[in-house]
Amino acid sequence: MALNLEALGKKIGPIIKDYTWKDTVLYALGVGAGFSELEYCYEKNLKVIPSFSIAAIFEFLTHIGINSNLNLAGILHGEQELIFHNPIPPEGSLITEGKITHYYDKGKDKGALVVGESDTYHSTGKKLFTSIITVFSRLDGGFGGENAPKKEVVFPDREPDLVVSASPSPDQPLIYRLSGDIFDLHVNSEFAKMAGFKMPIMHGLCTHGFACRALIQSLVPGAPEKVRRLVCRFTKPLYPGTPIKTLIWKTEEGKAIWRVVNAETGAVTIDNGIFEYGDIPEEKIRFDGRVAIITGAGAGLGRTYALELAKRGARIVVNDLGGARDGAGSGSAAAADKVVDEIKALGGEAVASYDSVSTPEGGGNIVKTAVDAFGTVDILINNAGILRDKSFIKMEPESWNAVLDVHLNGAYNVSRPAFTVMKDKGYGRIIMTTSAAGLYGNFGQTNYSSAKMGLIGLMNALKLEGEKYNIKINAVAPVAASRLTEDVMPPDFLEKVKPEFVSPLVLFLCSEKCPVSGNIYNAGMSCFNRAAVVTGPGATLGSQDKPETLEGIIANLDKISSLKGGKEYGQLNDQIGDVLSALSKPLDSKVSAIGKQEKTASVSAVFEAMPASFIKSSAAGVDVVFQYNISGDKGGDWCCVIKDETCTVKAGKHDKPNCTLKISDSDFLLLMDGSLPAMQAYTSGKLKIEGDIMKSQLIEKLFKR
């Protein structure tokens, strides 16, 4: 097994972890906190120990191992650097994206170093921390790469300024592992002996947490929010219950170096520690060098977005037809020109566009204006709109189509050419302007509501296409005064719904700091919240062979209708996967989807047997390529091509698979001998399916049981 050098620089993530205050408290208890540090252990005024960060994104380490194709039998957490940008809130979601940045070769039989770097944002949009992790893989050296540059931390030739003693419990790993690292080495005595230890060992990151507490206690007591940087190298393991000392030397204002030693033997267990601390400087988000298109920017919300982005350095295309509220008339250049003049008066850069978004030609011209004037497009805010409100019976086709042409088709007409530019450059931010009328309905606005809900569908699909190109698409439902509403809202209410109360959220979604895509936000009057389509757990009725009756539906309507325990899906395949899981029946424990096998000898044997198990009569009209990525020492890549009622199986990767199945070698063999049902493997995450998930359902049809 060789390192996958092609993984270098490729994006990992986004990896999303939801957490509550209980998770942060559990971590604190796992690294030795208690009544003496109640700020970490009591939900009232709770603070988070900064080292919680690396435990919370432990899955990123797993992705480094899988993507690099590391020999998992020989990996160790070598070095860890954490840079903190903002305090970690006690609950929410963490969104992590990163990549493998370096492979270093220490030589054959000496191992390799794999360095991964990631940024983690909170669900509020704040950047929390950067992690630089170095994995030492003692079995993967000798691939011909360069050696790592030497790092040296010089310790003063004097006794440490501060010494903090601690006595981890003999049971400490049992608590700490509940924060994510459940590796058998820290709990299973037999496994530990096979690995060369007399008993399970402490997690290095658990000791790391003890050290973080000691550093805060000594240098910024009671103020974990002042931790700026934490660096170290893991050197020797510890057994649970072994007392430790954290030795600290102050080197300059706001900086110290440190190490952790075994208090019984003096052996260094964590070395080369660097700790930086102080107040977090205020971060101001800028848009220097970015080019933004705002449609409908001649007044109201669009004008406010344009001015605020310009104040922060963006170059602006102010698009506005200058027409009436209902879209009638030939338009006027005055509205867009006035906003351009305002931006220039502020010292900013802007050009006007008078094209209508309602035609593909108009949309293309708007984007061309940006490219001709500024060379590119980074941000698009689809804000243009008109109103033609009527009750449904009176809603003639002209009014229906006119509103859809501006709101829904208009977003398509401008987004498509803008997306092309963004895709080529690998960056973009697109905002759809939806409405509470679309999300929840409003009398007399069937055309407007339909268009606004249609934008959500456009966003949901486009976010998937934009993901690999760092193009994030979100939607805002504003409550604000505009040309569409200025004469239908009372004057005193208009004052409360100024566009300035919406723009901060929109600017965040336009920024590099935005970690989310596919989200819907309500905004207005200083109130912000997220809206989502939530699917209830429902009920599985009838069977695959016999549909439920009408009477059965009525009898179970409460279960079908309940949203309690509801779930938000990221894409169609996720929802279909749950449906298939609900409908699936456990396979016979002795039966495989590919032939009856009491026990499967090897992964390669399964693929050698596939052609013999192929059912030609079931393959009429089937044209599909299955790609199997089997991880582990005994794994590999195989592709299975079904075409013209033939089955061809080859080792390696296919250029254009329809469906890719990823699973470890051990789980794959359990799947094949029937010990692990396919749907159980899928829903537990052991089997991951990419591409057309529905095609995977053909496997049982195409191969003998």
Image (tube, rainbow, N blue to C red):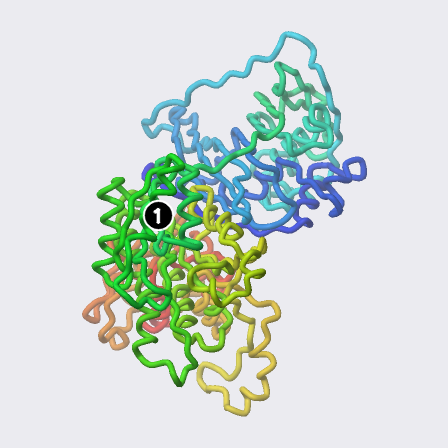
How far from the left and from the top, in percent, is residue 248? 67, 19
Q: Quadrant of the N terminus?
A: top left
Residue 259 falls in which quadrant of the image? top right
From the viewer's perspective, is 189 left or right of 335?
right
**In the picture shown, does residue 284 fall above or below 340?**
above
**Residue 8 visible, this angle:** no
Q: Residues within 10 Å of mark 1 (few under 14, many from 20)?
A: some
Q: Which residue is mark 1?
A: 338
Q: For the view shown, which residue lies furthest in the bottom direction? A: 551
How far from the left and from the top, in percent, is residue 656? 25, 56
Q: For the view shown, which residue lies furthest in the right direction? A: 35
How far from the left and from the top, in percent, is residue 448? 40, 71
**In the picture shown, does residue 191 fall above or below 602?**
above
**Residue 301 visible, this angle:** yes
Q: Nearer the viewer, residue 501 or 519?
A: 501
Q: Nearer the viewer, residue 422 or 4?
A: 422
How far from the left and from the top, in percent, is residue 520? 48, 59
Q: Secondary structure at mark 1?
A: helix
Point 57% across, 29% down: residue? 281
